[in-house]
Image (tube, rainbow, N blue to C red):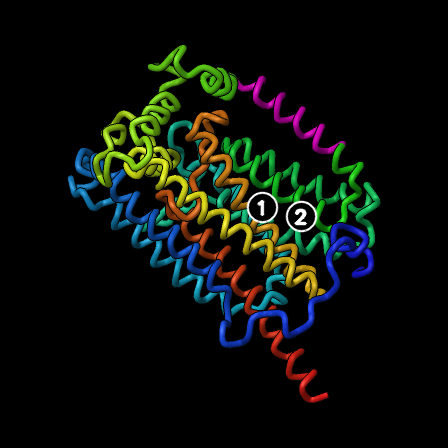
Amino acid sequence: MLSALRTGLFRSSPPRAPAASYPTAREPIDLTLFWSVVLLLSIGFVMVYSASIAMSEAEKMTGYRATYFMMRHGIYLAVGVAAAIITFQIPMAMWQRAAPFLFMAGGLLLVLVLIPGIGREVNGSRRWINLGLMTMQPSELMKLLTVIYAADYTVRKAAFMDDFKKGFLPMFSVMVFMGALLLRQPDFGALVVITSIAMAILFLGGLNWRVFAALMVLLAGAFAVLIVASPYRLQRILGFMDPWADPFGKGYQLSHSLIAFGRGEWFGVGLGASVEKLFYLPEAHTDFLLAVIGEELGFVGIAVVIALFITFIYRAFMVGREAMMRERYFAALVAQGLGVWLSVQAFINMGVNMGLLPTKGLTLPFLSFGGTGVLVNCLAVAILLRIDFENRASSSSSRKGVMRA
């Protein structure tokens, strides 16, 4: 099995690094990765407050409190950090053993959310399960579970990665079923992200490149059919291509997002001074938070956010590379899968905000307001730090072995 994994992307990897090349045990985790996430979460907390003040003061459900959304986001962050601390204690071997069962549990949640009385419908979409104090969005959880399951599947099926029938088809069948459930909600954005995760991990694990190329063409065609067959998706595409043709209709969100970026210029209009968040820009504290950042903090603020994301994603792939060099293939694929997931979702959200991609309901990881999204992002970071921690523990053990010899 391990030799089959080496025939994939792993084959071109550099030779195993000597134990002394990895950071010492005095640094139990990757501090660059850790602080990049802390800064992103901190910026998100401040900007969610800034973007949601007007909405909080206007809606009766909030009791007219300006801090309503900020307080809720703070609670989500606290729960996410507490869950991350617990998750960090779980060895990767345990995640690998539980991967199939966790994925089935996630699929069950996708079924439950479609049942009237269990799933909660908002604006025509049934994506949430009401848990009393908070709502849960199963599609957000499935992104993390897909990373874990796809990594485990790839390691288990390593010997068959060149075989379409035995290596790819079983995974493809499972993902088609999950995709059908997501389209029933509907949640096209989550489907795109989850498909990207599964395909990337299979490719990194050694999937035949010809099969991969053919599937990419087929997926592009399938997504095109889904867009054309759905009037509201087609309208979003048309609005994206020329938002100014109908600025009060299908191009409303994008036109106001672009106005926000234009007003921000280089250094922004100042924290809290956004005009577009005053009921001009829909979903200012969730999907279009980056536009508010651009208006209030300008190009410099956007550059800082992008730089932090690049730093985080780079370190995620480096953690995966270190795990691969220590022949910890499941951990390596999980780390790189997490990097793919968060980079794809961040890229789509930024592209939508800047008018580079059609409008899609995806939040900006670590920054946007949201319960399940914040929690799952924190869990992903905890797993990534756990992989890095085990890499360093392995390096320390190897170094001690060399010293004894």
Extreme residue toward the top, this view: 245
| Quadrant of image for the N terminus | bottom right
* Label pair 1/2, CB-CB below 8 angstroms: yes
> Which secondary structure lies at badge 1?
helix
Cα distance in 3D space between marks 1 and 2: 9 Å
Quadrant into which the C terminus falls: bottom right
Q: Residue at x 66, y 44 (%)?
A: 200
Disc sitting over residue 321 in the figure = none
Q: Position of residue 374 (x, y in %)?
A: 41, 50
Q: Is residue 283 left or right of residue 362?
A: left
| Mark 1: amino acid | Val
Label 1 Cα neighbours within 10 Å, binned few <14 / some 14-19 / many ≥20: many
Residue at the spot 49% in from the left edge and 66% down from the top edge: 88
Q: In this image, 302 relative to 189: left or right?
A: left
Res 239 → quadrant: top left
Which residue is the site of mark 1?
340
**Magenta span has 161?**
no
Count residues near mark 2 (Cα–Cα under 10 Å), then give few for <14, some for 14-19, many for 20+: many
Q: Amino acid at mark 2?
A: Ile
Residue 110 vs residue 125: left or right? right
Along the line of sight, the residue nearer the viewer: 117 or 87: 87
Q: Position of residue 9 (x, y in %)?
A: 74, 50
Magenta segment: 214-230
Q: Residue shown at 82%/50% (left/top)?
A: 160
**Is 224 colored magenta in this rendering?**
yes
Q: Main secondary structure of the magenta part?
A: helix
Note whether 388 is above or below 55 in the view shown.
below
For the point 82% across and 42% down, the residue is 165
Kind of element beneath mark 2: helix
Q: In this figure, which residue is indicated by the disc labeled 2?
A: 201
Q: Nearer the viewer, residue 211 or 300?
A: 300
